[in-house]
Amino acid sequence: MRWKDGRRSGNVEDRRGARLSGKAKGGGIGLLVLVLVGLFFGIDPSLILQLGGNMTGPAVQESQYVPTEAENELADFVSVVLADTEDTWGALFNQAGGSYEEPTLVLFTGAVKSACGFAQAAMGPFYCPADRKVYIDLSFYQDLRTKMGAPGDFAQAYVVAHEIGHHVQNLLGLSDKVHSMRQRLSEADYNKLSVRLELQADCFSGLWANHADRTRHILERGDVEEALNAASMIGDDRLQQQSRGYVTPDSFTHGSSEQRVRWFRRGLQSGNIQACDAFSATTL
């Protein structure tokens, strides 16, 4: 991916070195266990985080933190990708007669406090609609490469673009509509809505890639394959098979590997936000 000459975003909040001290009451490790259990059983982790946000958690303390050269390069890369999503979505919102509110991307190490509660790096990157911020511990990219078999800088960019896709959904009011249905639907039916929300975010990330490449020529040979591979590696069916040896489709919250690949490719090939209407699609 061609990125080193790209613009850097001014919306990066660097909390690396901020440590959570003390024992959390209902947060911290206990919250992490709840989140992991929620992921295992197909429960939306954002609900658990929101619950955690009402609990007393550990205090935040600053500590001396010296990132490696490789980590600083990753932080620089993430800043460029974020800036690129700002340019893309800013233009798309302007074309539609609207205004794009740029999110903040928070870099952290180990654990972080968000408006949605406390979160650990083991959760992976996430978007918090309550404060409109994306959170990422850069160590996730090592896991993406070594544990999930999805190396490459464009695979890393796909992760950021997917979370920004959730921000776009939040601005459009789609996230609230889905979450408002939680109490009215069975868990299985709500999970189906969650899958559509996630697949749309995958489509939005592909749409970003389409527009970014057309305007700034960011793609190099093999980049698309990297993103498709990453989408495939984090499908619910693959993750469930790896973690417990069997698959239960009713508990899917993000979509199968095939579905995630298909919707990323849909956004990439069409470049049209209307093509990403996962909620009206008869088949996913």
Image (tube, helix red, strand yellow):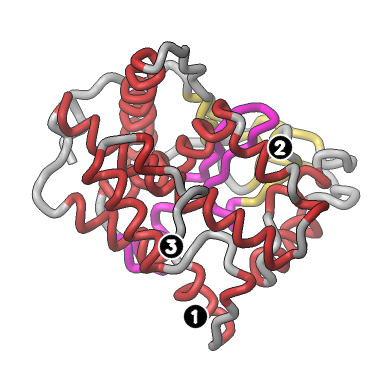
Magenta stretch, residue numbers: 121-150
Which residue is found at the position 39% from the left and 43% from the top? 276
Left or right relative to 262: residue 38:
right
Residue 41 sits in which quadrant?
A: bottom right
Q: How many marks?
A: 3
Q: Position of residue 144 (x, y in %)?
A: 39, 59
Q: Are marks 1 and 3 in contact (CB under 8 Å)?
A: no
User: Is residue 48 toward the left or the right of residue 127 in the image?
Assistant: right
- Which residue corresponds to mark 2? 113
Distance (Cα) linking label 1 and label 3: 26 Å
> Could you tell whether 26 is left or right of 45 in the image?
right
How packed mark 2 is, by other alpha carbons closer than 10 Å (few <14, some 14-19, many 20 or more), is: many
Judge by depth and name the residue closer to the eye, 13 or 182.
182
Is disc 1 in contact with disc 2, using a CB cutoff of under 8 Å? no
**Residue type at numbered disc 3:** Thr
Q: Secondary structure at mark 3?
A: loop
| Residue most extreme to the left | 221
Check if residue 131 falls in the magenta segment: yes
Q: Which residue is mark 1?
A: 242
